[in-house]
Image (cartoon, helix red, strand yellow):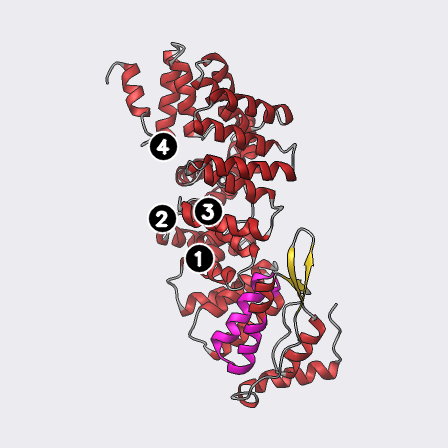
Amino acid sequence: MMTRRSGVGLFLATIALVACGRTHRGRDPGPLPELRYDNQPGQGRVARIDVAQVAEWCDAEALPLPPAVGSAEPVVAEALYGALAAAARQRSAESFGQVGRIAESLDAHRSAIEYFRLAGDKDGGDYRWPYYRGSAHQALGENQQAIEALELARTIDASYPTTFARLGQLYLDEGRYEEAHDSFRRYMEMKPEDWFGQVGLGRLALLDGDLDQARELLEQAARIRAADFQVQFQLGRLHAALGDRERAQAHFDAAAALPKGAWFLLRDPLMQELEESAGSAASLQREFERLSETRDWPTLTRLAEEIVDRRPNDATMLLNLAGIYRIQSRFEDAHATLDRALKVRPDDSRFLCARAETFLAQGEFERSLTAAQSALDIQPEMVRGLVVRGRARLMLKRYAKAELDLRQVAEQVPEDAANLFALGEALRLQGKTSEAIAAYGRVLELQPGFPNAQKMLAYLQGTG
């Protein structure tokens, strides 16, 4: 625990901070307290930080309090120590900003805010420092301070899109709807390939009761990125407002299966740079999540392998790594990784389902069907399990049973174009032509360029 400093100590530290640009320039700082290392079961090597001693060192060097982190991965602790030493020695915007970035990557928001404030004092023409400071206030739920800092960042440089995304969210939370609308609209104009602006404007339309406008905006967002928590959740709210409880619940269920909280990192290069500053396993994981849609398989493989090397019992990352191996047709590596994962969680339906997906990719359909059934015995409504069982049955020419699985998936995830195409195939191969035509048509509504859907539709309609 960090010791509480006296009022006199705080007063003297404040004076020192004001004078830090003069009294400490050009002199070498004293040595930081030594790091201690030990090994922890399931965590590997850990660095121990004496927070009270480091705080005293910062006080002596006229620096704000450091992150109150008593232990960390060695690479993180060493990066923090290096940044603190550089800040004491150089006293520049970049050196202060680097400590702030590392502190923020450790969720030490208060410490980060003070270092970003010092960086901004050193270079008032750099929008990054008030932007980072606003982001830290936003993480703390201090909306007014966040707005003030982000508005300053916008005034300094209005070319950074995510400033408008953050301000849109903050204005909406504060009931400043006109400003929220302007910010979301500006973000949408600057980043038309993203869906965040449409979701924000759709939320405002829902608040206004303009359900037609909300539908247009949210369906536009879904065409860009259906597998997003906010897209699915807001579509659920829309259909609830329209009185379609069944469809609303399907969207809410889809949202519940998606990762939450990724409001800004995936669309925020500055925060990505911040996350990389400490090199922690957590930052590697966030980088993995950010790149997950890029299909950059070598980079994703490297990140996943490094994460599981540092966190050998990370079952979710083991699952991700097995999936990446499968996509690259590295089937032996995929099965070996799943063997390792199942030792950690032998009854986890996700790993049994991943095994089924790997067998399906290998063309071993009977083994895929057996593994999928094992997953569904544990979790009968599991969407991925139903998908792989349905596709295995389709490949084994068990069309009626495949139809049952794929219909159940369509009810739970109605915007899944790939599943609807597979359902169309199951229907077509049973001679259910009108139903297959409807399925292919819905696929093309959701994804106009979907491979083979137009060809199959034209064939069934006699126009191909």
Which x, y percent locates residue 342?
62, 36
| Dot 4 and dot 1 residues touching (CB under 8 Å) | no
Mark 3 residue type:
Thr
Mark 1 residue type:
Thr
Res 227 visible: no
Mark 4 residue type:
Gln
Observer-side mark, 3 or 4, equals 3
Vertical placement of 184 versus 279: above or below?
above
Checking the image for residue 192, the label placed there is: 2
Residue closest to the eye, 303 or 180 = 303
Give the labeled residue for mark 4: 447
What secondary structure is found at the residue carrying circle 1?
Answer: helix
What secondary structure is found at the residue carrying circle 4?
Answer: loop
Residues under labels 3 and 1: Cα distance? Answer: 28 Å
Q: Quadrant of the N terminus?
A: bottom right
Give the labeled residue for mark 1: 162
